[in-house]
Amino acid sequence: MYRSLWHLLIVQLLILIALLLPAIPVESEKYDFFFVVDITRSMNVRDYLDVNGDPQSRLEKVKADLNQVLLQLPCGSTVGLGIFTERMPNIMFSPIEVCSNYLEIRDSIQHLDWRMAWVADSNIGLAFYNTIRLMQRLELQHSHLVFMTDGHEAPPINPRYTPDFSELMQNSERIIKGIVVGTGEHGLSRIPKFDEEGVQTGYYTAEDVPHQSSFGLPEDPTQIEGYVPRNAPWGNVRHDGNEHLSNVREAYLTGLAEQSGFVYHHLQSAAAFSAALMQPDFASTAKRASRFNHIPAAIALLLLLLLYPIEQIFRRAAKQIHKASATQT
């Protein structure tokens, strides 16, 4: 009897501890990411397959894999979200804690849409450059940039006007690090064409898009067929190409990553994407208030089960129910 009494007192003490135990600061690993997603028209190319084996667009693949990454990130990690089109990024929200804001982050990712684009053109290099510069101005150097794009520029960009990433790396206190994620397969695919209602009306053809840059001055005019300095600096001969078709421009994106001190990853599976993000270089440690109330509560339950076997508990409960029903009748 005395042993049972002591067991009950210990159980009550453990339950009291479980109810009153405050959060304890514990040092844990975390990740801080700022995801910026390309929403230009080439991201509508369906060169992925979803879990059911059906064609999936690059943008839908990005959204699906980002949601998988959210589930892998430990609490205390932060996530921000942005989009870009043409040469300018737009911040949807600054980095916020992933566990307490999971539903809001997931919902924002799910609503990413190509119709959010404010300009039809895309200049990947300048958009990447401007995103890094924006993060520096906002002092987001503690977040790692995850820049997701297929690298397809429309129209093709004049290499004479590419940005100088070395300028962004001069301030050692505000250097932004991260990963460039290439989306799409290596083989060329057709780019879907949509109307104002978002209904597909066909695919872009060679006549729909420019196949050569016509901005600024060419690097070497002698290589331009039909070059006329004033009236035709890019030549007076029609140029045909395959800019109406799209694939991941991996060489271009790898070059951007090397110039900026980033790493490159080709998006293929959610598991490989998560592994690329959760590497030691992107991890940091911080003290986070953690609750351990479940531990004394679990021990209390275990002691109760040892003191009163489950069969005995159910038998006593059945007797009480039978006694209560007999009293009512």
Image (tube, rainbow, N blue to C red):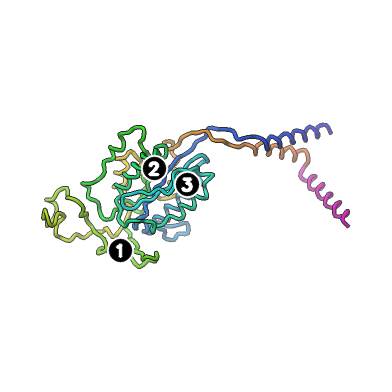
Q: Earlier in the sequence, mark 1 or mark 2?
A: 2
Amino acid type assigned to the residue bearing label 1 in the image: Tyr
| Residue 13 picture location, percent across and down | 73, 34
Q: Which residue is mark 1?
A: 204
As drawn, the label of residue 145 is 2
Amino acid type assigned to the residue bearing label 2 in the image: Leu
How dense is the environment of label 2, judged by Cα within 10 Å: few (below 14), some, or many (20 and up)?
many
Amino acid type assigned to the residue bearing label 3 in the image: Val
- Magenta portion: prevailing SS class: helix
How far, Cα to Cα, is label 1 from label 2?
Answer: 32 Å
How far, Cα to Cα, is label 3 from label 1?
Answer: 33 Å
Residues drawn in magenta: 309-329
Front residue of 279/93: it is 93
- The residue at the far front in this view is 137
How dense is the environment of label 1, judged by Cα within 10 Å: few (below 14), some, or many (20 and up)?
some
In the image, is residue 313 part of the stretch drawn in magenta?
yes
